[in-house]
Structure formats: structure tokens, C-alpha cells
Amino acid sequence: MNRKTFCAAAALLLAGTSPMASAQDATPAPQPTAPGIRWQKEVPAIASAEWTGARLADGQPDVSGFWSNTISNHSNFTDPQAGPPGEPSAAAKLPRDQRAPSRVSDPGDGQIPYLPAARALQEDFAKNFPNPVKPRYIEPLARCAPAGVPKSFMWHGYEVRQYPGYVVFLFDSGTRIIRLDGSPHLSPEIKLWNGDSRGHWEGNTLVVDTRNNNGKALFGRYGDFMSENATVAERFIFDADGKRFNYVATFTDPTVYSRPWTATIPARRYTVADKPDGWHFDVKPVNAPGRPLQYEHYERICAENNGPFGGGAVGVPSDGAVIDR
Amino acid sequence: MTAKAAILLAASTALLMPTLAGAAPAKPAVAAVPAAPAIPRQADGKPDFSGIWQVLGEADYDLEPHAGRRDAPPGPGVVEGGRIPYTAEALERRASNFATRAKDDPRLKCWVLGVPRGVYYPAPFQVFQRAQDLTLVHQFGNQVRTIHTDGSDHPQEKHQEFWLGDSRGQWEGDTLVVDVTDFNEETWLDRAGNFHGPDLHVVERWTFVDPNTISYSATLDEPGIYTRPWTINVLLHRRRDKGFQLIEDYCYALEYEQFYPHKDGQ
């Protein structure tokens, strides 16, 4: 993403918590070149089943291509269309059942079952997010930190590329390499923004065990989080026609939660039938005259272009040496 | 083995093949090919560079020949002909960069290193290959480059000033030839302040020397910065250490990572 599109995306981010965002949002309306973020309210159920769709030469279900989440960005994990702390969306005034459900699908109350001390930390972050007077209150993605697990699935659209032994997710803020070869996890001493992922296919479901998490990415602007002790059991459940998948992830972390809990984040595929929108589907036409239309995503750049973009989502330019190697 | 020696070896291997074929006239020429070590190939027969690769050498310290100094081990240089053919004006800037390299090298911010520097920077990168593209995931920072091999051309829209340029590749026999254009001028070529401008044009050549070694060359051209095109050659080695894998290294996040996740008492 170049500087121009990053700024446009940032404006969309603030204005576009829902298609109903109104004048109470002080930030600019979506740019003319981007039709806005298309959010849905429903989360369709997708059952684990056999895979009946296309397969790659190595036998993997073919899910390569462009994908993006369908209900909202990372502004609000448990009330996805209500907006970030201090900036409620227009939809936030509506009865709760007129917005997309909580991403917490278990427990049934839609809340992350924090231990009291962890809940206090999350609430302290949310309270300070609109006016981050300390570095710890700046949402790390605003610094271009890797979006990590699970926030990467609530940010911009992303691309899946598959290879024998691998599923690779290319996000705007980082890359996840899912290894399918049955190899062991890295040493538990190593903690990473994206964790260390080992997976396998069960029918229509990519099952991934993610460990080695550093917990630093947070889940979004309300400061929901896991610690470096968390393990995440992820299930990417693809529907029969390959148009959607649900990301269903169970988080286990006895130091932060009173019990394991599960998140569900819906996603849909983007194809040449969709119009590029600079957000879900930030692509350009492939320059191949005489061939049918195809799209490609240009390089993904963030830290190098990052700058302030207002509100609690304050960018933090970084221009000094950070390594000595 | 030097890059030049590797190319000589590859050339001599190629010369050997007709000889073998001639010695066994009853068989088709292709029957002689197994005399050379088999290289990995895609289903379509093209070489398959999938794997984790890393340079072994001093190129990133200084592309040109240099004696050992405080911040660099000695190196024979990887530039054909020894020196980079800068214009007089560019040579002054290079000297200025060299003087301030301890603070101005973009690598120190963990930013995208660019092309070709990312290839010979001494950190591993993984190639994921399909018929239509190669994806290079570099361990260092957040650098992911797609080399398109689907016959497409550079984007019609020019001057997008990519950090990694725009890469379009094609096969010339078993050599992947990649044309890379439309850069910005933010990246350096090494730790010694060698540099390019926004009109840099790079042509890379990727060729297997053997199944675990790639001969990599890059020819750089930019009128106004260089007086003529110039070429570097390095070898890339397959990382074969037991259990080796890329480990994310988003080092640009190091300056603020201590603030997360939430902790008591802060």
C-alpha cells in the first residue's frame, strides 16, 4: 500500500465503522474512488464437512485468492458495528439485534470471560484509547505493528496462496506461514506477533494450532487481548461453493481467561466479479492485454509510510534506528 | 566457489551434454541430461526455486572490494569489474552516505531493503513458487515480493514508486529473468551507502548451479546515477539446517513492543 491509499484507508477506517456512519463522525467521508466498506449484519453458519470443491495438485482444497471479513473492522470486538471507544457509530444507537453479533460465539453472552485483573487492564485501555496519553494506550496496528491473531482477519482484505505443505496468508500488516508438514512448534521461548502455526486439512476445514504468541497485537481498539501464555485452536471452515469461510478460534489462556472461549469471524471471497474498493479488495488490474480481467495486489507497505491519522487511532511515525545488526 | 566459478561450472556442464549425447547416438539427446545433477522442477518443467535461501558473503557490507574496517569484514566485492560506475555527482553522494552510514542506512529502521539488496542481505528468505508467480517472503522486516511469471507486463500506471519495484519474470531456458522497475529512492544497496535513484531498472537472472545453489545476478541501470549498466553476482545457498524455518522478524516493532500486551503496574 502506498502513502495515498494508506491515508484513504485510514479515513475509511474511522468513518466506515458501518455503512450508516453519520455526521457525528468528524472524519472525512469515504473517498470517491472507494465505494466504502461493505458490512453485513449476519454471520452464516458453515458446518465442518467433506470438501467437494476444487483441489490443488497436492490435494489441498483450493482456497487461493482474495478474502476479507464481512461484518466490521477491529474497532470493537464484541459489538463489531458499534464503533471504537469514544466514537460510537450511528448504528450504536439502534437496538443491539440490528447490528452484527459479538465475535465471541462462546460463551453465549458474547463476552470474553476475563479474570478480574485482566478485565481491568482491558477496560483501562478502552478508556484511554480516545486520548492516548501513554504509549501503552496507542493501538499497536496504528504503529503498523503486525495485526497478529486474530486481528489480521478483521483488518483489510488479504490474500491466500497455497503450496505443497503450506498455506500462506498475505496481510497488509504481516504474513502468516501455516506449515502443514507435521513439524513441531518452535521453542516456547520464542514469542511472535503472529505466533507459530501448524495445520492440517480436515475435509473443508483448515485446522491450525497456533502457539508462541507474544500477545502484543491486541484484538482491536477496545484492548481485548491474550497473553504470551495463550494457545489458539483455529478452524477455517470453508463453504461448499468456496465463496465464504468462517474463522472459528478457541483461545485458551488460564492467566487471562476464566475458561477457554471461542471467536467467530466471517469472511467472503473477492473475485473479478467484485469492484476493487481499496479496502476489502485493494487490487489493480493485471496488465495483460488480450486476456480476461484479473486483479493483483501491489506490495504491502506500512511502517515506511506510516503517519498520524487522527483520533485514538493515532499513527506514530518512526524514523530512527531500531536495530544494531 | 566464487560466482564466476559457478557460472563456469554451469557452462562446462552445458558443454558436456552434447558430448555425451554424441557418444550415444542411438539415444535421443535428452537421455544424456541425467549426467548433470537433477534440479527441482515444477510440474510444467520449469526450475522450482521453492525453499529457503540465503547468501553467504560480504555483499551487504559493501558491494565493492574493501579491506576490513570497524563495521565491515573484508570482501572481494561482487561487482563485475570491481567498481560501481557512478557519475561524478553520484559519487559525491555515495561518499556522503558512507560518512553517515552508521545512522542513515535504512536497514537500521528495519525498513524494506529493496531489490536487489533484500536478496543478498544476510538473512534467509523463502521462495514459494507457482506456475504464475514466485513469492519471496524475507525474514527481515515485512518484505514480501511477488515475481509474476504469468506473462503480464508492468502496471500501465507508472511512477507508483514501489519500495520493492514491480517484478515481472520470464523463463529463458532454465534461467528466470526478472525485469524490475518503478522504484522509489528510499532504499540503499548496502551498508556502505551505495545507492540508486527512482529511475532504477534492475534485471535479475536466477539460475540453478546445483539443486542447493542458485547463481543470482542483477544488472542495475540508471542514467544520471551510473554511467553504464553494471552487474553483481552472488550465490544463494539453500538453508538445510535440521528443522530450519523462517522466524518472523518484524524488527521495526522493537521500539514499542514493550508497551504490549497490558501489564499491571504501568
Image: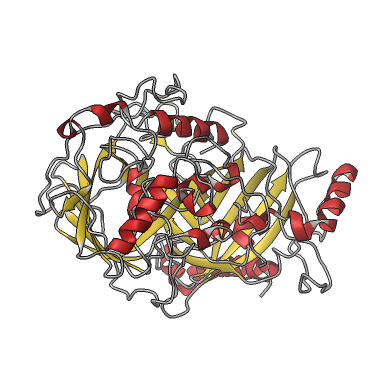
In the image, B211 versus B127, the foreground residue is B127
One can see residue B30 in this view? yes
Give residue B166's position: percent from left, percent from top: 56, 41
Q: Residue furthest bottom?
A: B242
Which quarter of the figure has residue A240?
Answer: top left
Q: On screen, B262 above or below B154?
A: below
In the image, B129 versus A188, the foreground residue is A188
A284 vs B90, left or right, is: left
**Rendered residue at 78%/58% (across/down):** B101
**Rendered residue at 28%/35% (across/down):** A81
A44 vs A172, left or right, is: left
**Rendered residue at 35%/21% (across/down):** A22
Q: On screen, A228 above or below B172?
A: below
Which quarter of the figure has residue B14?
Answer: bottom right
B105 vs B170, left or right, is: right
In the image, B20 versus A110, the foreground residue is A110
**Rendered residue at 55%/27% (across/down):** B157
One can see residue B79 in this view? no
